[in-house]
Image: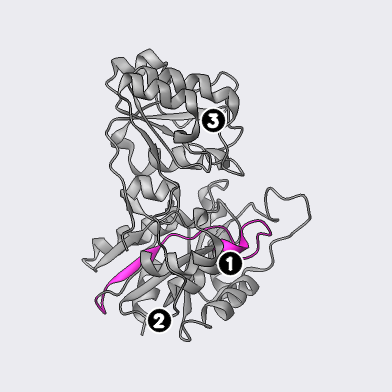
């Protein structure tokens, strides 16, 4: 069984439509942060407040700049492409620009867009399509080591934390592979498996395929999905947790997030030690010695002084390394992971 592999021609234009906040633009933001050398610009509707710090471009600007692939850089709830975006996507395809998207709405299902691409020779690339024939999870223990990012909610830094930890392990010449489980991670890494698009019965099997047997000293650094706390997306999180059989987990959290985002009910986020205990209880059903290697917190809303105080206080409370993957790096978590992994 093969995981998805994609190859996107560069440079990129990040398409943002009219998404209202950075949470919904996390695909574009992730690519702009981790692959800035590939990004030529951004295209957004006039009412869009999000700015990735890239040059604003029109369709003609993109053509003149030699853009090869337009990445639909949004992740709205439900993964749908709004109808008002389609005319602009058709204009981009008609100009001969490839379009890549990782939404549940498939580009190949938009008839007028397919016609435009066929006429110009542009390619439509749907990233969020799992391979056929995924197995049901077997629960078979696998060789190699695995660390899985889990979250207190969606969009709290699981992908950034996994990529930063992978980079830190590679810096130390430790054998490691970043295992992408979502659209953005797959676009960054060029391979992976869109776990949230897998039929529920096969989620744990897909996780097994994504992180197969490996050398005893090799680490799979697995991007998390959803949250065990989120009433909308807990199913994918538990399937990924059981199928990954992680030796360790890293809890990811947003310092400003007090309750689960995007739901109609009131679901406060529990104390972090409670979240860790619950996750370990689930993880140890499959991997009895699983431990928490630390907490990665998005503190982007804080200044340096407040961030350092917050992380220090949290570290004292939990007895675990607490970092901001972007601002302070993952070195303490990598140290803890390597020291305590059996």
Residue beneath label 3, please? 50
The answer to which of 276 and 85 lies nearer the viewer is: 85
Residue in the picture at 40% in, 81% down: 140
Residue beneath label 1, please? 313
State the SS at label 1: helix
Q: Is 87 located above or below residue 304 in the figure?
A: above
Residue in the picture at 69% in, 59% down: 231
Q: Nearer the viewer, mark 3 or mark 1?
A: 3
Q: Residues within 10 Å of mark 2 (few under 14, many from 20)?
A: few
Q: How many marks?
A: 3
- Looking at the rendered image, the quarter that the N terminus falls into is bottom left
Q: Are marks 3 and 1 in contact (CB under 8 Å)?
A: no
| Stretch in magenta | 215-236
Give the Cα separation between the discs numbered 1 and 2.
39 Å
Q: Residue 50 in the image: x percent, y percent?
A: 54, 30
Q: Nearer the viewer, mark 3 or mark 2?
A: 2
Q: Is 261 located above or below residue 214 in the figure?
A: above
Q: Residue 141 in the image: x percent, y percent?
A: 39, 82
State the SS at label 2: loop
Disc on the earlier residue, 1 or 2: 2
Q: Residue 225 in the image: x percent, y percent?
A: 52, 58
| Disc number placed over residue 140 in the picture, else none | 2
Give the Cα separation between the discs numbered 3 and 1.
32 Å
Q: Residues within 10 Å of mark 3 (few under 14, many from 20)?
A: some
Residue in the picture at 61% in, 44% down: 78
Q: Is 16 located above or below residue 166 in the figure?
A: above
């Amino acid at each position: 069984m093969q995981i998805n592999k994609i190859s996107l021609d560069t440079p990129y234009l990040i398409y943002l439509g009219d998404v209202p906040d950075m949470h919904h633009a996390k695909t574009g933001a992730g690519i702009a942060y981790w692959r800035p050398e590939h990004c030529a610009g951004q295209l957004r509707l006039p009412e869009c407040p999000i700015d990735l710090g890239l040059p604003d471009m029109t369709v003609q600007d993109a053509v003149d700049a030699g853009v090869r692939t337009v990445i639909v850089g949004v992740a709205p709830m439900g993964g749908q492409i709004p109808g008002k975006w389609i005319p602009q996507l058709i204009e981009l395809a008609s100009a001969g620009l490839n379009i890549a998207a990782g939404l549940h709405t498939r580009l190949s299902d938009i008839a007028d867009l397919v016609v435009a691409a066929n006429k110009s020779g542009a390619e439509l690339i749907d990233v969020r399509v799992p391979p056929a024939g995924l197995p049901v999870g077997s629960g078979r223990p696998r060789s190699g080591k695995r660390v899985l990012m889990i979250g207190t909610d969606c969009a709290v830094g699981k992908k950034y934390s996994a990529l930063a930890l992978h980079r830190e392990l590679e810096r130390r010449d430790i054998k490691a592979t970043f295992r992408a489980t979502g659209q953005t991670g797959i676009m960054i890494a060029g391979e992976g498996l869109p776990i949230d698009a897998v039929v529920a019965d096969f989620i744990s099997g897909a996780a097994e395929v994504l992180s197969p047997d490996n050398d005893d000293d090799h680490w799979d650094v697995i991007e998390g999905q959803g949250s065990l706390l989120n009433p909308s997306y807990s199913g994918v999180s538990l399937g990924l947790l059981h199928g990954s059989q992680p030796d360790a987990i890293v809890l990811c959290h947003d310092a400003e997030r007090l309750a689960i985002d995007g739901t109609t009910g009131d679901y406060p986020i529990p104390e972090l030690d409670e979240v860790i205990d619950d996750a370990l209880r689930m993880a140890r059903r499959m991997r009895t010695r699983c431990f928490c290697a630390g907490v990665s917190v998005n503190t982007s809303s804080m200044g340096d002084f407040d961030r350092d105080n917050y992380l220090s206080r949290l570290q004292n409370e939990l007895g675990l390394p607490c970092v901001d993957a972007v601002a302070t790096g993952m070195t303490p978590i990598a140290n803890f992971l390597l020291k305590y992994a059996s």
